[in-house]
C-alpha cells in the first residue's frame, strides 16, 4: 500500500463580511470555488470529486446543504462528500479531500467549506437549551471563557497577553484583503478598554461572526508537477469526548496526541525551529498561547512567553496567523479550511502582503466542539 | 441500577426566521414574483427552467439570462396531499404537482388547490395577498377554466405578461427590488433523557442529587451517563452526593443574546460537588460577581419545594458557604 | 490498489420509536461492542472511526458529538463524521484504509427518526429558496415521482404492490412483517394517491456498525470477510424539474465505476416501492438476483443508518466466491447514490 503524494494546487476564498447579502449560499461558495479553480488554472471538467464541509445545518436552516449546492460546486455527476466535525470541519474537509488523492482514488479533488452566519444567529443555534438542562450556556464564548480562566491560573500568564494576540491578529488582518476585520490602528490600550463580554474574554479578543467560504484544489503528483504547489507532508485528526472525569480542558490530550502524530509523520523533531509559519484556530485571543503549548511549540505554561516576546508576530520566530486568523474572519465552517489554505498560500509564496519571507513549511490547524476535535496538516514548498 | 420507570422526555421546539439573501438570479426571480411575474432561466442547453437555477443543472455555469414565462401551465405529474402538514401552501386537502408553465421547458413543484387533479390538466397561478416572500408570493395554482380568477381587479391583459400565453388574467404590481426573503422554520421534537439521566432527574424532583459510578473507571459521574465517556459502558452504582462543593472555574456572562433565559450579568461556574469526579455548570449568586473565585466553597440554594420538577433548575443557584477556599492542588485535575 | 474487507456487522433492533436519546448512545453501546467482539478486536485496535448522522434529525447542533461517548473515546481516537447516511462514512473509512495510514476502521450510523416530525424535517433538504419554503414532504415528492412512471407505463400499481409484498414477507425481525399478496395490498386504500402505505417506508429508529479491515488482515479477524471490490457514489442536480425522475443516472454511473456484473444478491436502499424498480433498472439487476433478503428500507428505514445497513446485510449474506451488491441513497428522490460491490471470501 503506497500513499500517493498530494499537493494543494489552487486556493480561493471570499471577501469575508458580517453579512454577504449580495450573494446566496451557492454564490458565496462559488466565489471561493472560482478563485481556487483560477488559481489552479483548471475548470470543473478537471475535477474528479468534491468534498464540502460546514458546521451545524441549523446555522443556515438547510439540512445537508451540499445536496442543493451540487450544481454550484460543480459536483453534479461526480462524487460529493459532506464532512461535519464541528468547528474543526474546515480542516477535516481538506484532510478528507487529501485522503482521496493519497489513496489513489482521484487525481484532482475540490474541497469547499462555508458558513453563512447571517442567515440566522450562531449564538441562538449554539445556546438552544434542551429540556432538563440548565440554560446557563452563552454561546462559544461562554463555553470557552472558564477554560481561559483556568489557563491563566495554571500558567500565571500576565493579563495583557490576550490583548497582544488580538492586536497582532487584527493588524495582520489589515494586510489581508479578504479579512472581515481590518484594524490597522488597534492598540493594546483599545483592546484592554473594550467591553468585557465573557469575563475574562473581552470584545476585542473575540472572533467576529462572518459570512465566507474557502476552497482548495488538491492534486496528485502529476497534477502538481511544474506549477506552484503546497505539498501535503502530513495530515492528522483526533477526537476525545466533550467531558469526562479528569479531562484536561486547557491542554486537551486529543490536541497533544494529534500534534505528536503530525510532527512524527512530517519528520519534524523540533517544531519551533522547523516550522516557518503557523495558522492556528484562535477564536478567542488566549487560545494562541494555549495552542502553542498544546502543539509542542512551547513547554506547558510557557506559550504566553513566545507571544509576549513578539515571536508570533510577522518577523518573529514563528509567525502565527499572518492572515489575521479567526480573530479577523470567522465563517465558522470555513474557518478551519482558511487556516489550511493560508498555510498553503505561505509555502506557495502567494500570501501577498502577509507573506512570511522564505516560508518553506507551514502548519494549518483547526479545532472544534469543546476543544475536542482536532485536524491539522503540514504543507511544504518541497515534495516530502 | 436503572429505574424501571420509562426515561423522561419533553418537547423541544426549534424556531427561527431565517434571512435568505438571494444574489442576482434568485433576487430577480423573487422581484418578479413580487410583481406577479414568473421568470425562468435559460440553461446552457437552451432549455428554460422555472424556478431559475443559479447554476446550470448540467454544466454548473452561472445562469443569468432570465426570461418571463406564462402563469398558466400543464400538470406533468401530481400527488394527493389529503392531510396537509404545517407550513404547506394549503390547509385543506390539495394536490402537489409538477407544473410546466407555458414558455418553460422544465416543471416546477407547487401546490394545486384541488382534491384531485389529472396529468395534462391546465392550471393557473394564484397569487398571495402579500409580496416579497419569494416563492410564497405564488400562493398555489388553481385549475384553469380559461376565465381568470379575478385577481387582476377585473382587468385583463395585464402589462408585461410574457410569452407562452399567460392568459392575461393578472395585473403586474409595482414592487421593490427583493434581495432577501425571510423563511420561518419551526420544528417540534421530543427530547429524551437517558435512563441514567432520568433517574438523576427524578432524584432532583425529591431534592436528592444522585450520581452514578462507572463500573470500569470508578469515577462518579453527575449527571450519570448512558455511556462513561472514557469506557463506553453505562454508569451503574448510585452515589448520593451532598449539595455542596467548590467552584473549579467560571466566567461572568455580560453579553445578552437571542433566546437567553437568564439576565446578564451572571456567573456561570463549574461546580464540583464533594465526592463527584466531574463538575457541572451552574449559577453562582449570593456575592458580588467579582468576588467569585476558583476554589470557592459553595452550597445549593434550592427553590421552594413546591416549585421542584425533574430538573437541575430546582437548584436556583449556588452561594458561598463562607468556608475557606479549597487549595488549588485539590481541583487542578478538574480544569 | 490496496483492498479492504468488511469483517463484521451489527445493527440495533429497528423499532418504530426508541425511548433512547437522540445521540444514539443506548443503541450504539451494545452494537459497537458486538461488532468489535465478532472481529476479536477492542476499541484500542481500531485505526480510524467514522460516523454518519444528522443534526436536524436530533433537532440540535453538534448532536453527533455525544455519540463518541458510546465508544469511550479516550485515549483520543482518529475520527471523522459525515452529515449523511453512514454508507458515506464507510466510503471515507474505505479511503482512509487505502491511504495505508490505518488497517482497520469502525463505521457507525444512527438516527432517532421518531424524535421529530420526519416528513417536515426532510423538507429542509430541498432547495431553500424556491422549494423548501413550500414544505413539500418526502411522501408527496415520491408520489410525484411514482406517477411519472405510472403515466409513462414504466411500472404499474401492481408492480409496486409486488415489490411491497415481497419486502413485507422477507424479514420476521423487521418492524413491518406480514405474509401478504400483491392483490391484497392493491385493495388497501391510498395513503396519498398514487401511493399506498405499503409503498412508503416506516419511520424507524436504529443504528448500525460495520468494521472494515485491510484485506490482508481481514482473514485474521473473521472466517468470512467480504472483500469490497468496488465502491463509488455520484450526486445529481438538486433542481427537480431538470432531472428525469424516472431514472437514476447517478446510480448508473456509480454502478459502472464499481463494476456490478455477476452479483447474486442485492441490498437496495429504496425507501419507496417504485424506487426499487428505478434502481433495479439502473443497476441492471437480472430476475435471478435475490433482492433485499433483509426486507430493505420498506420494512425498516433507520435514517442515516439504513444505507450502511444495506452494506452490512449484503456482507453478512454473501457466500464465499459469491458477489453481492449494496446500494445506499441520500437526499430527495434518489438524488445521491452509492454502490458497493462485495465478494465473499
Image (cartoon, rainbow, N blue to C red):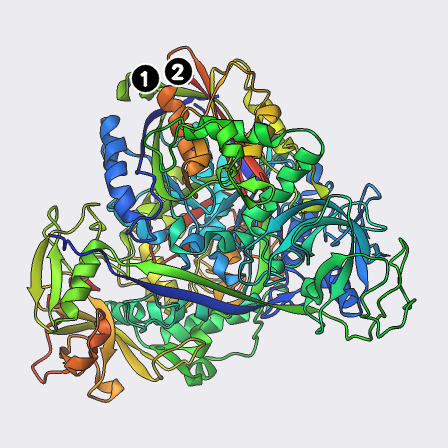
**Could you say where residue C321 lies in the image, as x and y percent from the top left?**
41, 10
On whether disc 2 and disc 1 are found on a single subunit, the reply is yes
Give the label on residue C344, or none. 2
At horizontal 82% and vertical 73% (from top left) the residue drawn is B173
Label 2 to label 1: alpha-carbon separation = 7 Å
- Determine whether the residue tagged by mark 2 lies in a helix, strand or loop: strand
Q: Quadrant of residue A13?
A: bottom right
- Crowd rating for badge 2 (residues with CA inside 10 Å; few <14, some 14–19, many 20+): many
**Could you say where residue B238 lies in the image, as x and y percent from the top left?**
8, 57
At horizontal 68% and vertical 58% (from top left) the residue drawn is B113
Please identify the residue farthest to the bottom as the structure is shown. B288
Q: Quadrant of residue B182?
A: bottom right
Say if mark 2 contacts mark 1, CB within 8 Å. Answer: yes
At horizontal 39% and vertical 45% (from top left) the residue drawn is A237
Q: Above or below — where is B323 with respect to A110? A: below
**Could you say where residue B55 lies in the image, as x and y percent from the top left?**
72, 49
Chain bearing tag 2 is C
- The residue nearer to you, when weighing A251 against B30, is B30
**Which quarter of the image is occupied by the C terminus of chain C?**
top left
- Whichever of labels 2 and 1 marks the residue nearer the N terminus, that label is 1
Please identify the residue farthest to the top as the structure is shown. C321
Q: Above or below — where is A133 with respect to C77? A: below
Give the label on residue B28, or none. none
- Crowd rating for badge 1 (residues with CA inside 10 Å; few <14, some 14–19, many 20+): some
Residue C220 visible at all: yes
- The residue nearer to you, when weighing B54 against B111, is B111
Residue B318 visible at all: no
- Determine whether the residue tagged by mark 1 lies in a helix, strand or loop: loop
Chain bearing tag 1 is C
- Circle 1 residue: C224
**Could you say where residue C297 lies in the image, as x and y percent from the top left?**
45, 35
Q: Answer left or right for B12 relative to B28.
A: left
Amino acid at each position: 500500500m503506497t500513499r500517493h503524494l498530494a499537493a494543494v494546487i489552487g486556493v480561493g476564498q471570499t471577501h469575508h463580511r458580517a453579512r454577504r447579502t449580495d450573494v446566496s449560499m451557492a454564490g458565496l461558495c462559488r466565489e471561493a470555488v472560482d478563485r481556487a479553480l483560477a488559481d489552479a488554472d483548471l475548470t470543473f471538467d478537471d475535477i474528479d470529486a468534491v468534498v464540502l464541509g460546514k458546521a451545524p445545518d441549523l446555522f443556515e436552516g438547510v439540512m445537508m446543504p451540499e445536496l442543493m449546492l451540487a450544481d454550484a460546486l460543480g459536483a453534479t455527476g461526480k462524487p460529493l462528500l459532506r464532512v461535519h466535525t464541528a468547528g474543526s470541519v474546515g480542516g477535516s474537509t481538506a484532510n478528507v479531500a487529501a485522503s482521496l488523492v493519497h489513496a489513489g482514488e482521484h487525481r484532482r479533488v475540490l474541497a469547499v467549506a462555508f458558513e453563512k452566519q447571517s442567515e440566522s444567529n450562531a449564538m441562538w443555534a449554539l445556546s438552544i437549551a434542551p429540556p432538563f438542562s440548565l440554560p446557563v450556556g452563552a454561546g462559544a464564548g461562554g463555553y470557552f471563557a472558564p477554560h481561559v480562566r483556568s489557563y491563566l491560573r495554571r500558567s500565571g500568564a500576565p493579563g495583557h497577553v490576550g490583548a497582544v494576540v488580538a492586536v497582532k491578529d487584527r493588524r495582520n488582518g489589515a494586510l489581508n484583503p479578504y479579512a472581515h476585520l481590518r484594524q490597522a490602528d488597534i492598540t493594546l490600550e483599545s483592546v484592554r478598554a473594550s467591553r468585557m463580554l465573557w469575563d475574562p474574554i473581552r470584545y476585542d479578543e473575540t472572533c467576529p461572526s462572518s459570512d465566507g467560504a474557502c476552497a482548495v484544489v488538491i492534486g496528485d503528483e502529476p497534477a502538481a508537477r511544474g506549477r506552484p504547489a503546497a505539498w501535503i507532508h502530513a495530515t492528522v485528526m483526533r477526537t476525545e469526548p466533550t467531558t469526562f472525569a479528569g479531562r484536561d480542558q486547557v491542554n486537551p490530550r486529543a490536541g497533544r496526541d494529534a500534534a505528536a502524530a503530525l510532527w512524527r509523520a512530517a519528520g519534524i523533531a523540533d517544531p519551533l525551529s522547523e516550522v516557518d509559519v503557523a495558522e492556528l484556530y484562535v477564536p478567542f485571543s488566549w487560545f494562541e498561547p494555549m495552542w502553542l503549548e498544546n502543539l509542542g511549540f512551547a513547554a506547558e505554561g510557557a506559550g504566553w512567553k513566545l507571544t509576549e516576546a513578539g515571536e508570533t508576530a510577522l518577523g518573529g520566530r514563528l509567525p502565527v496567523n499572518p492572515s489575521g486568523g479567526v480573530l479577523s474572519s470567522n465563517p465558522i465552517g470555513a474557518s478551519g479550511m482558511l487556516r489550511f489554505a493560508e498555510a498553503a498560500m505561505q509555502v506557495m509564496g502567494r500570501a501577498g502582503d502577509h507573506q512570511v519571507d522564505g516560508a518553506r513549511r507551514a502548519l494549518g490547524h483547526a479545532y472544534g466542539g469543546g476543544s475536542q476535535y482536532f485536524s491539522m496538516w503540514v504543507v511544504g514548498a518541497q515534495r516530502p | 441500577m436503572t429505574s424501571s420507570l420509562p426515561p423522561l422526555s419533553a418537547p423541544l421546539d426549534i424556531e427561527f426566521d431565517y434571512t435568505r439573501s438571494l444574489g442576482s438570479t434568485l433576487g430577480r426571480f423573487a422581484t418578479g414574483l413580487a410583481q406577479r411575474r414568473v421568470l425562468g432561466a435559460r440553461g446552457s442547453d437552451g432549455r428554460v427552467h422555472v424556478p431559475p437555477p443559479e447554476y446550470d443543472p448540467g454544466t454548473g455555469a452561472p445562469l443569468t439570462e432570465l426570461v418571463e414565462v406564462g402563469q398558466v401551465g400543464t400538470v406533468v405529474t401530481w400527488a394527493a396531499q389529503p392531510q396537509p402538514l404545517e407550513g404547506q401552501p394549503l390547509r385543506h386537502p390539495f394536490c402537489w404537482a409538477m407544473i410546466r408553465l407555458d414558455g418553460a421547458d422544465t416543471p416546477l413543484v407547487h401546490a394545486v388547490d384541488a382534491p384531485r387533479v389529472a396529468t395534462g390538466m391546465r392550471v393557473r397561478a394564484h397569487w398571495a395577498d402579500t409580496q416579497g416572500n419569494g416563492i410564497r408570493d405564488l400562493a398555489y395554482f388553481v385549475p384553469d377554466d380559461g376565465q381568470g380568477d379575478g385577481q387582476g381587479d377585473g382587468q385583463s391583459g395585464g402589462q408585461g405578461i410574457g410569452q407562452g400565453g399567460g392568459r392575461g388574467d393578472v395585473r403586474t404590481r409595482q414592487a421593490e427590488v427583493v434581495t432577501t426573503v425571510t423563511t420561518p422554520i419551526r420544528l417540534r421534537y421530543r427530547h429524551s433523557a437517558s435512563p441514567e439521566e432520568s433517574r438523576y432527574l427524578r432524584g432532583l424532583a425529591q431534592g436528592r442529587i444522585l450520581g452514578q459510578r462507572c463500573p470500569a473507571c470508578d469515577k462518579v459521574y453527575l449527571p450519570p451517563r448512558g455511556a462513561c465517556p472514557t469506557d463506553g459502558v453505562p454508569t451503574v452504582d448510585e452515589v448520593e452526593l451532598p449539595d455542596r462543593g467548590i467552584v473549579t472555574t467560571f466566567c461572568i456572562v455580560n453579553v445578552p443574546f437571542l433566546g437567553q433565559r437568564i439576565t446578564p450579568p451572571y456567573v456561570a461556574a463549574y461546580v464540583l460537588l464533594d465526592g463527584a469526579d466531574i463538575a457541572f455548570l451552574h449559577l453562582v449568586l449570593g456575592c458580588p460577581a467579582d468576588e467569585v473565585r476558583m476554589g470557592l466553597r459553595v452550597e445549593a440554594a434550592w427553590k421552594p419545594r413546591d416549585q421542584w420538577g425533574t430538573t437541575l433548575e430546582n437548584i436556583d443557584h449556588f452561594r458561598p458557604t463562607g468556608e475557606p477556599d479549597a487549595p488549588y492542588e485539590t481541583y487542578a485535575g478538574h480544569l | 490498489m490496496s483492498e479492504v474487507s468488511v469483517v463484521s456487522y451489527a445493527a440495533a433492533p429497528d423499532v418504530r420509536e426508541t425511548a433512547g436519546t437522540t445521540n444514539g448512545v443506548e443503541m450504539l453501546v451494545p452494537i459497537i461492542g458486538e461488532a468489535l467482539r465478532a472481529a476479536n478486536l477492542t476499541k484500542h485496535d481500531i485505526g480510524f472511526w467514522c460516523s454518519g448522522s444528522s443534526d436536524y434529525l436530533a433537532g440540535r447542533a453538534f448532536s453527533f458529538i455525544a455519540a463518541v461517548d458510546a465508544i469511550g473515546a479516550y485515549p483520543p481516537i482518529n475520527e471523522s463524521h459525515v452529515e449523511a447516511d453512514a454508507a458515506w462514512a464507510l466510503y471515507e473509512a474505505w479511503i482512509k484504509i487505502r491511504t495505508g495510514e490505518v488497517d482497520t476502521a469502525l463505521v457507525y450510523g444512527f438516527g432517532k427518526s421518531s424524535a421529530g416530525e420526519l416528513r417536515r424535517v426532510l423538507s429542509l433538504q430541498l432547495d431553500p429558496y424556491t422549494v423548501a419554503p413550500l414544505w413539500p414532504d418526502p411522501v408527496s415528492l415520491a408520489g410525484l415521482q411514482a406517477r411519472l412512471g405510472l403515466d409513462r407505463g414504466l411500472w404499474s400499481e401492481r408492480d409496486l404492490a409486488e415489490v411491497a409484498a415481497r419486502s413485507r414477507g422477507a424479514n420476521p425481525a423487521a418492524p413491518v412483517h406480514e405474509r401478504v399478496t400483491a392483490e391484497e395490498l392493491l385493495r388497501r386504500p391510498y395513503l396519498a394517491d398514487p401511493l399506498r402505505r405499503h409503498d412508503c417506508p416506516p419511520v424507524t429508529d436504529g443504528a448500525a456498525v460495520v468494521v472494515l479491515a485491510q484485506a490482508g488482515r481481514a482473514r485474521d479477524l473473521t472466517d468470512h470477510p467480504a472483500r469490497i471490490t468496488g465502491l463509488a457514489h455520484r450526486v445529481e442536480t438538486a433542481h427537480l424539474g431538470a432531472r428525469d425522475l424516472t431514472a437514476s443516472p447517478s446510480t448508473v454511473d456509480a454502478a459502472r465505476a464499481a463494476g456490478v456484473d455477476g452479483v447474486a444478491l442485492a441490498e437496495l436502499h429504496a425507501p419507496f416501492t417504485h424506487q426499487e424498480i428505478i434502481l433495479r433498472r439502473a443497476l441492471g439487476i437480472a430476475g435471478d438476483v435475490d433482492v433485499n433478503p433483509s426486507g430493505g428500507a420498506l420494512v425498516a428505514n433507520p435514517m442515516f443508518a439504513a444505507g450502511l445497513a444495506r452494506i452490512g446485510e449484503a456482507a453478512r449474506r454473501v457466500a464465499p466466491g459469491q458477489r453481492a451488491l449494496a446500494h445506499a441513497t441520500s437526499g430527495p428522490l434518489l438524488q445521491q447514490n452509492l454502490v458497493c460491490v462485495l465478494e465473499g471470501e
